[in-house]
Image: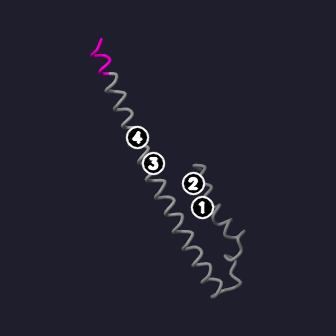
């Protein structure tokens, strides 16, 4: 019986290690996504400021227009369609 318990304990420990490693991987991917978002927001802000100087009447300076473009790209990916 002790061999069964040892096997079960070993299996449980391996499973816990696998979950811990999986969680670390997800956390790293999340940090990468958060960093990418921060970089993209900074780039967008800089581009919008430059665009406002170059073409003050650009349709991209209107938030609703940018939102439509964003939604067209975001929604299919977010919903898996």
The residue at which mark 3 appears reads as 26
Q: Residue at (44%, 44%) from the top-left corner?
A: 23
Residue at 70 percent across and 77 percent down: it is 59
Whether the magenta-drawn stretch holds residue 6 is answered as yes
Mark 4 or mark 1: which is in front?
Answer: 4
Q: Which comes sooner in the sequence, label 4 or label 2? A: 4
Label 3 or label 2, whichever comes before in sequence order: 3
Instruction: Locate residue 20 relative to residue 50 in the image: left or right.
Output: left
Quarter of the rendering occupied by the N terminus: top left
Badge 3, how many Cα within 10 Å: few under 14, some, many 20+?
Answer: few
The secondary element bearing badge 2 is classed as helix
Asked whether the residues under the numbered discs 1 and 3 touch, taking CB atoms below 8 Å apart as contact, a structural biologist would say no
Q: From the viewer's perspective, is 13 left or right of 78?
A: left
Mark whose residue sits in front, 1 or 3: 3
Residue 12 coordinates in the image, percent (x, y): 37, 27
Q: Is residue 65 magenta?
A: no
Tell me, for residue 20, which label it has, or none: 4
Q: Which residue is mark 2?
A: 77
Residue at the extreme bottom of the image, as rendered: 54
* Residue stretch rendered in magenta on the structure: 1-7
**Mark 1: few/some/many CA within 10 Å (<14, 14-19, 20+):** few
**What distance separates the C-alpha of mark 3 from that of mark 2?**
19 Å
Report the residue at 65% width, 84% height from top.
52
Q: Which tag is nearer the camera, tag 4 or tag 3?
A: 4
Element on which disc 3 rests: helix
Give the image location of residue 44, x and y in percent: 58, 73
In the picture of the structure, the residue carrying the numbered disc 1 is 73
Describe the element under mark 4 as helix, strand or loop. helix
Do tag 2 and tag 1 residues touch (Cβ < 8 Å)? yes
Location of residue 51 with respect to 25 vertically, above or below: below
Residue 55 location, quadrant: bottom right
Mark 1 lies on a secondary structure that is helix
């Amino acid at each position: 019986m002790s061999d069964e318990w040892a096997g079960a304990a070993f299996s449980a420990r391996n499973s816990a290690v696998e979950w811990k490693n999986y969680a670390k991987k997800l956390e790293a991917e999340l940090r990468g996504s958060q960093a990418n978002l921060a970089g993209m927001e900074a780039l967008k802000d800089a581009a919008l400021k430059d665009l406002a100087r170059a073409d003050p009447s650009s349709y991209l300076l209107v938030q609703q227009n940018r939102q439509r473009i964003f939604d067209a790209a975001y929604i299919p990916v977010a919903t898996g369609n």
